[in-house]
Amino acid sequence: MRFHPITAAAITALAVLTASPRNLAAQLALGAPPPAIRTEADLARFLDDLELQQWVLDRAATLEAYAQWRGEAHHQLAGISRLSTGLATRRDYARVVDQWKSRVKDSTLARRLELQGKFFLPAKADAATALALSALQTAIQDTFRQFRFTVGGQALTQTKLAAIIDSSADREVRRTAFEAFPQISARTTGPIRQAMVMTDRIGRQQGYANGAAAQLVLSSLTPAQVLRDLDAFEQATRPTYEALLARVRRDLGVERLEAWDLDYWFRTQQRAVADAYPTEQALARIRELATGLGFPVDSLPITVTIYDVPTGGVAFPIRPPYEARLLSNPFSGARFYATLFHEYGHTLHATRIRDDLPLGFLALDEQPATEGLAETLGHFAYDRRFLVRVAGVNPEQAAALERLGKLQQLLWLRRTIGANAYAEVQEYLDLEADFDSVYTAAYRRFVGVELPPGDYAATRDLFGTRPLYYPSYLYANMIATQLREAMRREFGTEDLSGEPRVAEWMTRHFYGPGQSVPWPEKIRRATGRPLDARALAEFLVVEVGG
Ligand SMILES: [Zn+2]
């Protein structure tokens, strides 16, 4: 055997590339047992290596998720999820984290361990269940993406179905489209049920009372807190909501309001005011907003693609802070704009994180805050001062569009968020209960209309794929309204849409520090008080009129 000169040179180059200032033997190889850790310096090195492995998996998973959402057939998401779950279920790593959690003096190390404590919760549960759940969730996601609904002999995506309900003047056509939703349940009722049972089992193994408690801890929330805030929100917004239902019933001239009437009313109302949301202007408008807020739009590494995805839109922090992408689906109307602005908010967040943070902090916040920062942008879609400046409408038209935007947000928060979140938390408190019945009751209370027969609970993929994701959006809206209120006060202006100090303020308090500061603390520091629902309740008080 002889060394070929080129091979020898290549080996030397590789050694130079991989050598670090410290002993290579002390580095944690992929999947290796943890080294002996005697000092905080040892612990910091272990966390550096561990966070790098988590980072690698996270980047790969984000890219593969992007491929999956683009409808590519050969994405590797299931395999990467399996690797991530394999890491999160490592009991030896979890033990190191547990042993040091209460002992470290350095506050940065303490925060890194706090985050690792949540990452390694799966290690406290049966690994086989976690792996099976992860595979099941990928399968559910694929079913929803691939499923086509049959209406009048045509095969339609969920987006197309929603568009019919949104825009068809023929009430029978709308009803037929709405009643097509449960077609998917034949394939999803069982898997979603199974995913919930597995989520619950894992949560109990982790030492929590149920699956909801275990999942909500990842958002720094509890089931009791969520039910209490949902109740308070439902009651605080009921007068405006009941006035809205009465108005819709009157305008449509119907005796009894049905689930397929509400979206249609919004579309006709918006069109009657002005055509302020043309589909082809949405991209230009979000750029205009971001510029007005003080973001260097042209140099942001953000790729925006309009693409039909089953949910409204989705953002991908490909490589924070150097690259982010979003997919937003081709709805029309205010909803399209609000979704696009929201997803753009996610990508702003991902690309404004400080790039010198330890890898463990170089991530978006926990769900409620991440969604809240996105909503902070989303609400601007129907801001009346912004519309006057960019949408070619007069102040009266803009005020009418803002009222409609808020009412639509109210409907969304009660129907998509309130009803789903309430049903989901209730179900985890008693998994013996029939989920379909629990869902129907929650829908009646939060939406104020009856669902037709059919398993509508199983038309919601997130119950299976993203347990306890819905409550995040209630908190997101509490956050968005409280942040804007604080900025208006601090900057002394009602018109934030043209206020270039917004970007700096958002970056300093929220985007920049990444996960180095817990989100409830970020909000307290930035707004001067803990998060509560007051600003949201005030935002949603609307004179319905008519
Ligand atoms: Zn979002």
Image: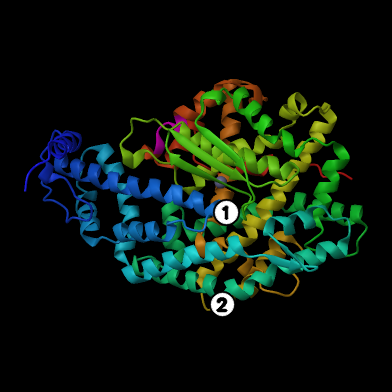
Residue at (62, 75) in percent of width and height: 186
Disc 2 crowd rating (10 Å Cα; few below 14, some 14-19, many 20+) is few
Examine the structure image and report whether residue 280 is included in the region drawn in magenta. Answer: no
Above or below: residue 505 compared with residue 94 = above
Residue at (13, 48) in percent of width and height: 37
Left or right of residue 35: residue 169 = right
Label ID, residue 433: 2
Above or below: residue 149 compared with residue 346 = below
Q: Secondary structure at mark 2?
A: loop
Residue denoted by label 1: 229
Pinpoint residue 496: horizontal percent, then vertical percent: 64, 26
Q: Is mark 1 within 8 Å of ligand 1?
A: no
In this view, which residue lies farthest toward the right?
A: 253
Pinpoint residue 246: horizontal percent, then vertical percent: 85, 55
Mark 2: which amino acid? Ala
Left or right of residue 531: residue 26 = left
Q: Secondary structure at mark 1?
A: helix
User: Which of 377/257 is in front?
Assistant: 377
Label ID, residue 237: none
Mark 1: which amino acid? Asp
Tell me which corner region of the image, top left, top right, bottom left or bottom right, holds residue 371.
top right
Left or right of residue 124: residue 162 = right
Tell me which corner region of the image, top left, top right, bottom left or bottom right, holds residue 184.
bottom right
User: Which of 452/284 is in front?
Assistant: 284
The segment highlighted magenta reads 509-514
Pinpoint residue 232: horizontal percent, then vertical percent: 62, 53
Pick whichever of labels 1 and 2 is earlier in the sequence: 1
Disc 1 crowd rating (10 Å Cα; few below 14, some 14-19, many 20+) is some
Residue at (34, 45) in percent of width and height: 55
Is residue 371 shown to the viewer in this render? Answer: yes
